[in-house]
Image (cartoon, coloured by chain):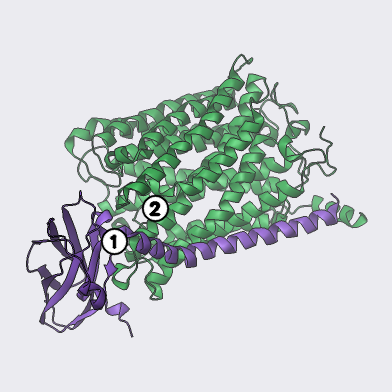
Chain colours: A purple, B green
Amino acid sequence: MDQSDIQTSNKKVVRNSILVVAAMFSFGYLLLPALYTLICDSFGLNGQTEQLTNAESAQLKVDKNRLVTIEFSSIVNSKLPWSFKPEVESVKIHPGELKRVNYLAKNLSGSDIVGQAIYSVTPVEAARHFKKTECFCFTQQRLKSGESKEMTVLFTVDTDLPKEIKTVTLSYTFFRADKYTSK
Amino acid sequence: MSETMTHDAHHEEHPGGIKRWLFTTNHKDIGTLYLWFSFIMFFVAGFMALVIRAELFQPGIQIVDPNFFNMMTTLHGLIMVFGAIMPAFVGLANWQIPMMIGAPDMALPRMNNWSFWILPFAATLLVAPMFMGGNFMAGQGPAFGWTFYEPLSGQYGHLAFFVFAVHLLGFSSIMGSINIIATILNMRAPGMTLMKMPLFVWTWLITAFLLIAVMPVLAGAVTMMLTDKYFGTTFFIAAGGGDPVLFQHVFWFFGHPEVYIMVLPAFGVISQIIPTFARKPLFGYASMVYATASIAFLSFIVWAHHMFTVGMPVAGELYFMYATVMIAVPTGVKVFNWATTMWRGSMTFETPMLWAIGSVFMFTFGGFTGLMLGVAPADFQYHDSYFVVAHFHYTLITGAWYGIIGGVMYWLPKWTGNMYSEKLGKTHFWLTAIAMNLTFFPMHFTGLAGMPRRTADYPLQFTQFNQLSSVGAYIFGFSQLILLYLIIKCIKGGKKATNEVWEGAEGLEWTLPSPAPYHSFNTAPEVK
């Protein structure tokens, strides 16, 4: 190749490489987070559960022959000065049966704080069979200084829950969310 | 044509002193800059490793506090990866690729200058926070591990320094890679088809493609950290609906190809050295090329084997396990090809050959522990233990770094025009090889027994193994001063090297005089 041909080819290599770099940056910054949420939601990975509407919950079939233990765990992030505990440690339910469980949260600090509960279900194979119709985790919770509040979750596991799963753990972590208040 | 003539003539008079190095666009000068920069960084990060080993000589906290210890492990890893190993390979590429393909220089010489001169600034940004905030011993620098997992790294006070350092390092690598791709694709001498290229050039071409594909993903990851901390996004913040596990996925999507970025050029160097000293052509040239390309492809689809313990579904663990173990196939092809090249060759054991054989032998060992780690159910025991530390030091020291030193020894007579001292070279090799094994072999046992990595303290029963490691580390560290002395001695003088330097050496770089002239191949050689 003579000099001017090489210059043209070099320009082409640079242009194409910059396109690859731009595409991979966008893939990393823009696409991956969306893809991650999409994959986790659609396969019930990472403890992501499904939300049921009231109409759907009225049509649930109940499997009276089976009992599943649901355990509750509660964690409060160190940045959040709250106490947060379920009223019961565990319940036994038939698959398809709706169950209401209350958690008690209290703001131990001298100021108003917004918190957000993040849930997770284990084992992961159970996550997509775990359905909630009502949950305090759907929205942010605001507690005034010293205020206590009963927080409710209404849930079930569906009848397709794999047979070998006898115990499902529902875990909540409460985070401080003042910085992320939805407007 | 007349225009290019005057252009070249103008280039012959390069400025002297500091200006020569600041403004140089010559591939040999820039190669030298890269190599010295990485050598300095190697000593800096190596010193940090010695602080780590001093603290770990005895259980309990003796010398530095735990946060400072964590800062040492973090900076040791980051500087070795981004400051020492990667720039060293770019340095080798700058020196050798134009000479090996018969090109007068790199394709984009000005960009070449820029990609080097970003590096010192990036390194400064990375370590600058160490000296901020008054109390040095409290460890103001990054102390969250070289993998900078969220949410821990998000709480780091000087995060912006870290993020911009990584951005700059990324710019530098990406520009260096674009330059290498353009050089290899456009500047080869007439007759040098892709499948006639020396293997070092091939491995660098593939490495450069890996770099431009994954460095932007790393830039994306650190940008997410930056916007999470300062601009209210919540990519990795659970309270706002993000997920810290996403960080691990993004990081390792970059991180796994990155480990091959660090080792593939070393494979290239070894593939140059072994045929020379076995006096036989490389066995299975084409399969070497395809194996390198397969390793590069597979590196994109195995990332989650670094994170088996995050709570993946069994199907995911199985997939990543099978895909990971599959990498052993092309890697095995390479190892067997090297062994077969040596088979019945007329071998001699000059220093570069010692490094190459040492690398094949010990890198394979590191590969085997990699297979153990790749087996998902077993990984739960090994995860984040000293077994992992032993594994990746066997792959990175005896894979990547042995390749670099082997390459430096192999080409040093061509660069300086003088033969180095074989006696010093061999002493350095054997001291390093023994000390390396003394340092890292015991870590397999402490790891299997449950000693976690990244902790400044450990239970009493690990004391003897840790003391062996620490003694080995200090021998390793001080042995490198021999290398420094050897190189300076070789630059200053010594037995004159012939043009061919090595009896069995094949390739265009050996047709040039030693030392290689400042401008080489101004008229392209003909390759038959």
Q: Nearer the viewer, residue B442 or B289?
A: B289
| Numbered disc 2: secondary structure | loop
Taking B391 as reference, is B403 left or right?
A: right
Q: Residue at x 63, y 62 (%)?
A: A19
Mark 2 crowdedness (10 Å alpha carbons): few <14, some 14-19, many ≥20: some
Q: Is residue B513 in view?
A: yes
Q: Which residue is mark 2?
A: B147
Q: Amino acid at mark 2?
A: Thr
Taking B111 as reference, is B225 left or right?
A: left
Chain where mark 1 sits: A
What whole-number distance in Å separates the C-alpha atoms at marks 1 and 2?
Answer: 31 Å
Of labels 1 and 2, the one closer to you: 1
Q: Position of residue A171 (x, y in %)?
A: 19, 62
Residue that sits furthest to the left in the current view: A88
Q: Residue at x 77, y 47 (%)?
A: B187
Residue B446 drawn above or below residue A104: above
Q: Is residue B38 in view?
A: no
Q: Quadrant of residue A52?
A: bottom left
Chain where mark 2 sits: B
Q: Amino acid at mark 1?
A: Arg
Q: Are marks 1 and 2 on the same chain?
A: no
Q: Quadrant of residue B51?
A: top left
Q: Residue at x 46, y 66 (%)?
A: B223
Residue A183 drawn above or below residue B219: below
Residue B301 drawn above or below residue A60: above
Q: Which residue is mark 1?
A: A128
Q: Position of residue A78 (x, y in %)?
A: 19, 67
Q: Residue at x 40, y 49 (%)?
A: B304
Mark 1 crowdedness (10 Å alpha carbons): few <14, some 14-19, many ≥20: many
Q: Position of residue B188 (x, y in %)?
A: 77, 43
Q: Position of residue B148 (x, y in %)?
A: 38, 56
Residue that sits furthest to the right in the current view: B2
